Image (spheres, rainbow, N blue to C red):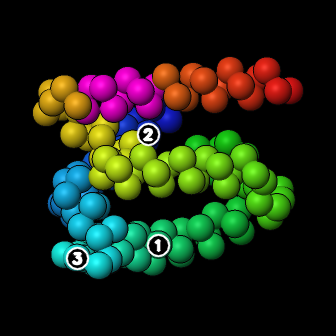
């Protein structure tokens, strides 16, 4: 129960941050990517503040063996950049650049009931299932 409550609390806080910062507006993302036109640095400021505010907590977590709820941390065991990571990042960036949508803001905006968000989230779910299937198949 504590895990679920903590997960919902963190998700709620993250969602509020996305709403307050305006990052649920695809136009902001597209304006950030438009470096030769109406460039808007808001996304860079939000990302920078997120990194700066999370950094001390990551430093703290790296000194601990377990999470606050008692689970063992699962840190990456390698610094090698796999082709799969590059392909996934490129695919994510392509979708983000075309739609201005990222999974977290899309889930927050899903409450609006707009059809294109339902299609986006359904496509996201299908893509996640395909990746899971492909990963299992390739092992």
User: Can the viewer see residue 91?
Assistant: yes
Residue holding disc 2? 7
Residue at the location (21% across, 40% down)?
A: 109
Q: Residue furthest front?
A: 36
Residue at the location (30% across, 52% down)?
A: 100
- Residue 94: x and y, percent? 46, 51
Per the rendered image, the range of residues in magenta is 117-125
Please state the total of marks drawn on the protein image: 3
Q: Which mark is residue 51?
A: 1
Q: Is residue 22 left or right of residue 122?
A: left
Q: Is residue 137 left or right of residue 1?
A: right
- Majority secondary structure of magenta residues: helix
Looking at the image, residue 39 lies above or below residue 134 = below
Looking at the image, residue 71 lies above or below residue 36 = above
Dividing the picture into quadrants, the one containing residue 33 is bottom left
Residue holding disc 3? 37
Of marks 2 and 1, which one's residue comes earlier in the chain? 2
Residue at the location (58% across, 53% down)?
A: 89
- Residue 43: x and y, percent? 31, 69
In-front residue for pair 53/114: 114
- From the viewer's perspective, is the residue at label 3 or at label 2 nearer? 3
In-front residue for pair 33/17: 33
- Residue 115: x and y, percent? 19, 26
Would you say residue 62 sits in the magenta stretch? Answer: no
Q: Are marks 3 and 2 in contact (CB under 8 Å)?
A: no
Of marks 3 and 2, which one's residue comes earlier in the chain? 2
Of marks 1 and 3, which one's residue comes earlier in the chain? 3
């Amino acid at each position: 129960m504590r895990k679920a409550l903590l997960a919902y609390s963190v998700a709620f806080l993250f969602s509020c941050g996305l709403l307050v910062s305006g990052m649920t507006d695809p136009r902001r993302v597209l304006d950030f990517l438009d470096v030769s036109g109406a460039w808007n640095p808001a996304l860079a400021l939000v990302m920078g503040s997120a990194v700066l505010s999370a950094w001390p907590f990551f430093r703290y977590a790296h000194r601990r063996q377990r999470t606050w709820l008692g689970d063992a941390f699962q840190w990456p065991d390698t610094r090698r950049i796999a082709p799969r990571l590059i392909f996934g990042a490129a695919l994510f960036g392509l979708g983000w650049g075309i739609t201005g949508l990222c999974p977290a803001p899309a889930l927050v905006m899903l409450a609006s009931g707009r059809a294109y968000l339902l299609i986006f989230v359904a496509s996201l779910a299908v893509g996640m299932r395909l990746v899971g299937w492909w990963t299992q198949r390739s092992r």
